[in-house]
Amino acid sequence: MDPVTTPSAPAHAPLPGVASPLAAAVLSGVLVWLTWWALVDTRHGQTLDALALEGSRIGSGRLDESADQLLATVSVPMVAAIILVVLLIGVLRGRWIAGAAAAVAVAGANVTTRLLKNHLFERDDLVGLGMWNGNNTLPSGHTTVAAAALVGLILVVPPRLRSLTTAFGVVAVAAYGLATLVNHWHRPSDVVAAVFVATGWGCLAVAAIRIAERTGPRRDAPHRPGATSVILVTFAICGLALATAATFLVWGIDLDEADRTAGLIAYVGGIALLGGVCSGALGALLRLLDATRPLPRNRAADEPSPTAAAPAPPS
């Protein structure tokens, strides 16, 4: 009896295209603009932000010192150090393209935040608070530094450390964003927009890596985030749901008539929004990056195909 054979599979699967990361980058940019439009350029949005800012004063005295210490770590030398670190990790791992893309993403996110805050976005005082309420503070520079640092690390760390890095990094980014709220430096809209800016640059970096690795060696083994993705998606859904509920409860409240309870609800909603956006946006970047990592060509070619010819049965 002739042996039973099946068609052999290709030695390696092609890399995914760039459509998904480019679409995600565009979506991130749209979300930055929508955040500014909804919470800065409308009266209802400014009211929600103002309520949350007022609510952040409740109990903030207990956290001011810790928030100051955390925010004091952010500086221009820190940004330069982050860029050097991601470049170095990329070089040591033999992944020059990923290291360069990560460095550009870190720098690009921080430059973009400065341009948006100081030159492109404007803020009119639509609720009559006066003073600094007419000065635009979106996006948050401190939160951008933290989020961009995480994006850079996700792009260059070994696959086995990627999920752990993302999980701890999301907590760190949320902590920096929360610290700016505790210190009354920023409103929830500012920190959320910063996360979207960093994520957008991370998506562009993923697209660049995919383009470069179409012809170059592919060095990272496949990786599946598994439980990390489930946890991040759960946190994102819960955070966004809680933020929506808080918005519903305080919607339409006039600032002159708002009490401490309304401010606290808005503040809790702002924190929930920050946590949900951090988990969802950075978790989505993790999934995009994992789809970029097939086996190296030389390893994939050496490994036997699972569909190779089966041995002939006994006659």
Image (cartoon, rainbow, N blue to C red):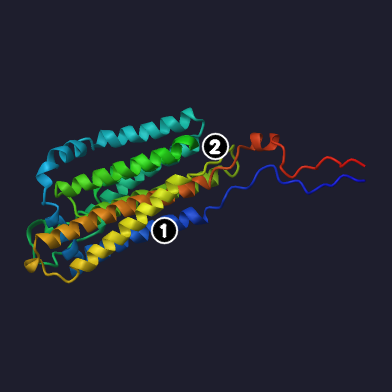
Place residue 252 in its image quadrant.
Answer: bottom left
Q: Describe the element under mark 1 as helix, strand or loop.
A: helix
Report the residue marked by disc 1: 26
Q: Is residue 103 visible?
A: no
Between the C-alphas of marks 1 and 2, the distance is: 27 Å
Q: Is residue 43 visible?
A: yes
Q: Residue at x 36, y 50 (%)?
A: 279
Residue 247: % across, % down: 23, 65
Residue 315: % across, % down: 93, 42
Q: Which residue is at the front of the view, 64 or 29?
A: 64
Amino acid type at mark 1:
Val
Task: Determine whether, in the image, residue 243 is placed left or right of residue 292.
Answer: left
Question: Crowdedness of circle 2 by 10 Å Cα count: few (<14), some, many (20+)?
Answer: some
Place residue 135 in its image quadrant.
Answer: bottom left
Q: Earlier in the sequence, mark 1 or mark 2?
A: 1
Please tell me whether residue 77 is drawn above or below residue 32 in the rendered image.
above
Residue 61: % across, % down: 9, 44
